[in-house]
Amino acid sequence: MRRGLRHPGVVGTHEDHASALAAELRAAVAGDVDFSVTARALTTMDASNYRRVPVGTVAPRDAADVAAVLEVCRAHGTTPVVARGGGTSIGGQATGTGVVLDLTRHMAGLVSLDPEERTAVVRPGLVLDRLREAARPYGLTFGPDPSTHSRCTLGGMIGNNACGAHSVAWGTTADNVRSLDVVTYGGERLTLGRDGRGAPAGLLDLVGRNLALLRTGYPAGLPRRISGYALDALLPEKGVDVVRSFCGSEGTLGVVTEATVRLVPLPADPVLVVLGYPDESAAAEAAAGLLPYGPLTVEGMAADLVRGGAGAGGLPRGGAWLFVETDGPSAAAGLVRAADALDSVVVRDPAGQRALWRIREDAAGTATRLPGGGEAWPGWEDCAVPPARLGAYLREFRALLADFGLRGIPYGHFGDGCVHVRIDFDLWTEKGVRDFRRFSEAVAGLVVAHGGSLSGEHGDGQARAELLPRMYGEELVGLFGAVKDVWDPDGGLNPGMLVRPKPLDSGLRFEGLPLVGVGREAARCVGVAKCRVEGPSSGATVMCPSYRATGEEKHSTRGRARLLHEMALGEVITDGWRSEEVREALDLCLSCKGCRSDCPVGVDMAAYKAEFLDRHYAGPLGLLRRPRSHWTMGGLPRWLALFGRGVNAATRLPFAARLAGVTPERSMPRVAGRTFVSWFGERGSRRPPALTLWPDTFTNHLSPEVGRAAVRVLEDAGLGVAVPSRRVCCGLTYVSTGRLGAARKVMRRTLDVLVSTAPGPVVVLEPSCAATLRTDLPELLPDDPRAARLAASVLTFAEALETLAPDWTPPRLDRPVTGQTHCHQHAVLGDAPDRRLRAHAGLTGGLSGGCCGLAGNFGFEPDHYEVSVACAEDQLLPALRAAPEGSEVLADGFSCRTQIADLAGGRARHLAEVLAEGLEEGLEEGLEEGQER
């Protein structure tokens, strides 16, 4: 229950003010008030180049909470307030120096949906995809669909007037909002609509005095004019549309608490046409000519944005492409005939369409990593020109990039003349920042010369607002300020954004950040928040299992990157590598490596976690503070080598789990009676060795049957096998527990063993060990050339059969499969050879993606059990429950097999075991047939 408000006013120091403000807010609101170091560090940045440190955060529960927050902040010296949704804004407008309103936690509901009226009532924190899922059974959708649709919120879309791929058909967010409930900083609750409904006192009078300016001050023929306030919507001939004029105001006029939005019919038979052109200018010039054919989308991108280059992912020939969606195959055929493209593909299959769209949607992050590894950033992200002028604009834009010695790859909504581009600005040095300003000023002039808008989708924020006079002139920009003062005379809502902005080169998030180290690496995260997707992941992604299990930003890849960034800066997080805030956030990181492949910019949180733990626990006192599991589970290879089966007896002792730092909910794996290496040493190789089979710790001590099966299959394929008799270890358990010194020592000893004894490629059965050898080994030993050679020689079991024995025919097993693709296999190794091998063996169906949730030591550690189970419920356990009767349960990873045994009660097997069994069955059948003859 809310309590009465007290208004103590401004108090002495900044800390006193923050403490008093937090106390007053806790007394006034029913929602969550969090002024902790972690909460502040998580919200210093959005998806822009800017950083602003808030005093605290509030997650309001309803409109009354929003009003209460604003009243308290107004009483405390006009403390600024900024509303925040998914935090994916690119102009800096989702950051603030006062109180940040997190509208995603409690104000994320769908209030109602009326399929007859084709409207929905939503709260501002509702993620777009949740609305689209609710509307889909009625054959409806919300038209605007930015590439961040899986995590952006309706409130953020209204604030930025977001658009997306389908705007050529369904318009911007402003075209699809019927009414808005808002709260002003002064405490007024208004319902905005047409015919002047909801206009604050003085607004319509101000408009009436400036009709001529509003009629002449805006560029014409520009479908993506997002910059500035849309004050021309208040003209009498445009219906005095207050709600439309509010859209795109970037949280500077009021806080949205509820919205009624329009829904549109889904296409009856969507067809995706991808057209190939020589370059993006050619594609841009063709785009405007396709508009008369009524396309639903006309998207453009160039080859440099495609992982794998031109021809990857089913794209047609060309150096750039238009992604054009139509309703029905006849419309698609007519469009292809008119397109004058080099090549084209027409895709009706929904799965094929999703795969191609994923290439386009990932461009926002992929564009941040240029070919050759250079970094590119937003900053001139989304200008728009009239579509007919886009080709000419792009040519001049390319020339301007060359003049400044910059690189960037345009892509975007070519049918609307809107171009996205990330550019390799040097934002780390004073000269680079000066060049950033000079280029921004020059390209603003170019856009205006083509009759364009500085922003065509993401709004102005701080990134472009300073340059608005070049587009609108000083008089109209002055009117923007007057309108801001009518709505928000105290100036408390998102100050410094859009109106009276700070300089575009001030407050950059790179300022003060070390040029090397984990902070620099974490700064790679640009905040597109692909890791912040709610609900079960698709089979194509692993990232970020702990966020989906908890729903907390600090347990997302982006959240952890932000904390590491703040740790490196030392302003909010002040205790560096000893930070408990960072340690707590990384504690639920499963080191699944999913972000290494799924994050569009390749953030590698598993590597950052390992370095953080190594430094966090450095020194004698740090060694004593380490969790016991770091010594027990983290040192598993050593303990198994020393004690072998004696470990089984130790795990049966009273309090063994507690002493080992293991959660009691887990059953400990049993050590085998005989190691795989011992078995192979006695048996020997039946053929001249052509490869080395890696005896990883899990296979050697805990599941030697997998190694024996692999030998059987490899030899049947004509491949002689060698197994090192001396102990080798990839160092995985030491890396995952952040004992990097021990990991390097183990790795060097392993290289010493293998340098003279390992024939041919090294085949690794355990995916996590194969991934460690391919990635962590050369990264931790960059100066040892043996590490790179070993990494390059590593093959998975399926890769070995495909590359070394291409003519071998596996046994026909002809049964359905279920189970788990190991997350490290997904992230580092790839599973295409495994899928082909299963298909050749007649194993039908697919394995689940995601992460099993055990993740080595993670699922055994105290306080991780519930998250571990929740991760398994993301994909693995539902897949097992839904599998046809008689399905073979496959899991190449020891952790995955252990999780399945613990949580589902069944036994999963390595693919090698299943193939070996098939060979034995085939041999027995052959013997029986011979006896019958």
Image (spheres, rainbow, N blue to C red):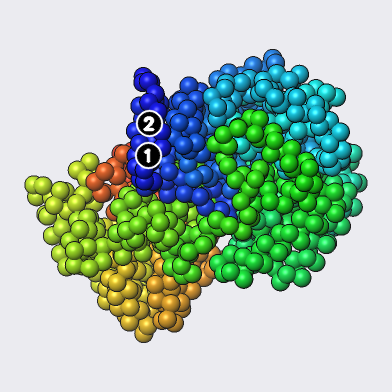
Mark seen at residue 8: 2
Tell me whether circle 2 and circle 1 mark residues in contact (CB < 8 Å): yes
192 in relation to 438, above or below: above
x, y percentage for residue 641?
20, 67
Name the quadrant containing residue 697.
Answer: bottom left
Mark seen at residue 11: 1
Residue for point 85% across, 54% down: 449
Q: Nearer the viewer, residue 505 or 160?
A: 505
Q: Amino acid at mark 1?
A: Val
Q: How many residues crowd mark 2 within 10 Å: few (<14), some (14–19), many (20+)?
A: few
Which quarter of the image is occupied by the N terminus?
Answer: top left
Distance CA(mark 2)–CA(mark 1): 8 Å
Residue for point 73% across, 20% down: 196
Q: Amino acid at mark 2?
A: Pro
Name the quadrant containing residue 648.
Answer: bottom left
x, y percentage for residue 621?
18, 63
**Image label count:** 2
Name the quadrant containing residue 708.
Answer: bottom left
x, y percentage for residue 293?
88, 38
Does residue 730 appear in this view? yes
358 in relation to 215, above or below: below
Q: Nearer the viewer, residue 10 or 36?
A: 10
Does residue 842 appear in this view? no
Residue for point 71% across, 38% down: 480
Which quarter of the image is occupied by the C terminus?
Answer: bottom left
Q: Does residue 585 appear left or right of residue 323 in this picture?
A: left
Q: Residue furthest bottom?
A: 756
